[in-house]
Amino acid sequence: MSDRLNGSAPALHSKSPQPWFVSGGVPNYHTPPGSSRSVHRQGWLQSKHFIIAACFLATFIAYVERTGFSVAYTAAAKERHLDEAVKGTVLSSFFWGYALSQVPGGWAAQRWGGRTTLALSFILWSTASLMTPVNSQRSAPVAVARVLVGVSQGLLIPSIHTVLASCIPPKERATAVSLTTSGMYMGSAAAIQWLPGVATRHGAAAITRLNGCLGLAWLLLWMWASRLLPATSSGMPVAAGAGAAPYSRLQKTRGAATPWGRMMRHPAVWAIVVNNFTFHYAFYVVMNWLPTYFDSVLHAGLASAGSAKMLPYLVMFAMSNVGGYAGDWLIGRRYSVARARKMVNTAGFWGAAGSLALMPMASGVRQGVLVTSLTLGCCGCARGGFSVNHMDIAPKYAGVVMGVSNTAGTLAGVIGVALSGRLLDRAGGAAELAGWRHAFGLAAVLCISGSTVFIRFARGDKIFGETDQFTDAQLREMLHLHEGDDDRIGMKPAQIRMCGSPQ
């Protein structure tokens, strides 16, 4: 019995051949025998590297679109003399749509696969971008188009995490996730640097058309790259022989149901949700109020910063990858997965808290860019902790957990940006440093609080696995398919859940 619980002889696998993605109880992230999607080495490159590159470009292009629309609509609103309230309503429309589709996006990725859901996301948002009437005299059609883009892009991050969970070994996931998500910051940096010139020379509508075309071009790349993904199994392997038919019947009856109740009650899931909220609160507050911060605190327009305005994004890109690499390096140095994630997460958020406290004290563009870069860089480092952890505790349901936590992150942006404005107004306006101390100070407190929750409740082991799709009664019935094995008959459902899935 003890051998089975230690994983040396998985009870439900002993009488059945293991699927191609399992070798000695360990997922095989390389070549499925006889598969057209085989993962071949090409020199030092492997197919997983092409998948990571494609996912990096996906986040890069998505954030070119997001930042690019802000540039385009700011130019269009200026031509039409729209007030800030109308502009704010249109710009925030994206986030309402984005929040609505996070959990459905995670469910869709888990149900139909990240490959399909990611392609669907790009088809939908690219089409919506091409059809956006950015120069319309009425703001309602533009807002509706932005909601549609938000809904479509809400499928993006859960799909990417589902894809990476299926083809990246656990000890490499932090680096892979950090690299792919860092495309967000490079995309934002590229858009803010070059798209204003496109709007000046060709008009605001040229940006939305360019964004849509970039999305469709990425789809062509994905049609090739997605063929390299392994054909993963949706459940436990079916036993050969007499037990196969009853097991298949159970699997067909239950399907691949998501264990919503267990996940939503588990503290480790909420540790990820809380830290996703904390990260996006700080990130969206800094980035949305950055132009006002430069004008009112540093007494310099953002345009006067030249290429230096790209630096915070570039630092965030670099530190996001540093955080991911540091997490994987610590695991390679025999630290536990949980400890490695907590160390990176804590270093990032505590560093961000200190930098946020320094932002109201900056004087001049150079100091302002420096402290902003430190803040966003530390936030990026923290992603090597909480942002990878859902793949540790629930690799099969990575997209679902990411969808739930990203919903919290999106709501953090809506709440944080609005609340910061109220804090500035209550202190006497953006020209008063007290308001900035309150706004950035609250973000700093949340960073420390979130990291404390993660230290206390985060886990590094797989909590939710393949057997979660079955009820306890169904697991007992499955045991009776192997009546010749007394040890297996005596096992409890909780013990089956511990050893019934490949680790």
Image: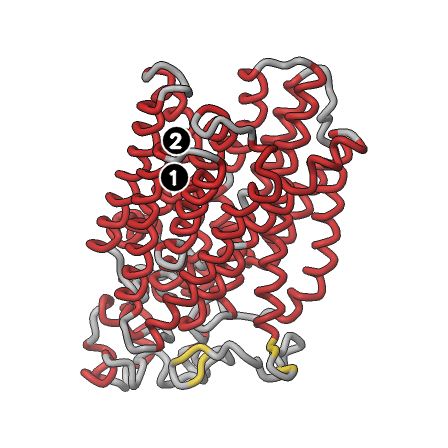
How many numbered discs, if any? 2
Residues at circles 2 and 1 in contact by the CB criterion of under 8 Å: yes
Choose between 425 and 493: the one closer to the eye.
425
| Amino acid found under the numbered disc labelled 1 | Ala
| x 76%, y 31%: residue | 200
User: Marks 2 and 1, Cα distance to the nearest angstrom?
Assistant: 8 Å
Figure coloring: secondary structure
Residue 403: x %, y % from top left: 44, 47
**What quarter of the picture does the C terminus occupy?**
bottom left
Q: Secondary structure at mark 2?
A: helix
Choose between 142 and 203: the one closer to the eye.
203
| Amino acid found under the numbered disc labelled 2 | Gly
Answer with mark 2 or mark 1, whichever residue precedes in sequence.
1
Choose between 229 and 485: the one closer to the eye.
229
Label at residue 475: none
Report whether 312 appears left or right of 474.
right
| x 45%, y 56%: residue | 320
Choose between 486 and 398: the one closer to the eye.
398
- Kindly give the residue lying farthest to the right in the view shown: 202
Residue 212: x %, y % from top left: 72, 42
Q: Which class describes the residues within 10 Å of circle 1: few (<14), some (14-19), or many (20+)?
A: many
Q: Which class describes the residues within 10 Å of circle 2: few (<14), some (14-19), or many (20+)?
A: many
Q: Secondary structure at mark 1?
A: helix
| x 30%, y 85%: residue | 9
| x 62%, y 36%: residue | 149
Say which residue label 1 marks: 282
Q: Is residue 411 visible?
A: no
Label at residue 416: 2
Residue 160: x %, y % from top left: 53, 56
Residue 487: x %, y % from top left: 21, 82
Hey, which quadrant is residue 303 in on the image? top right
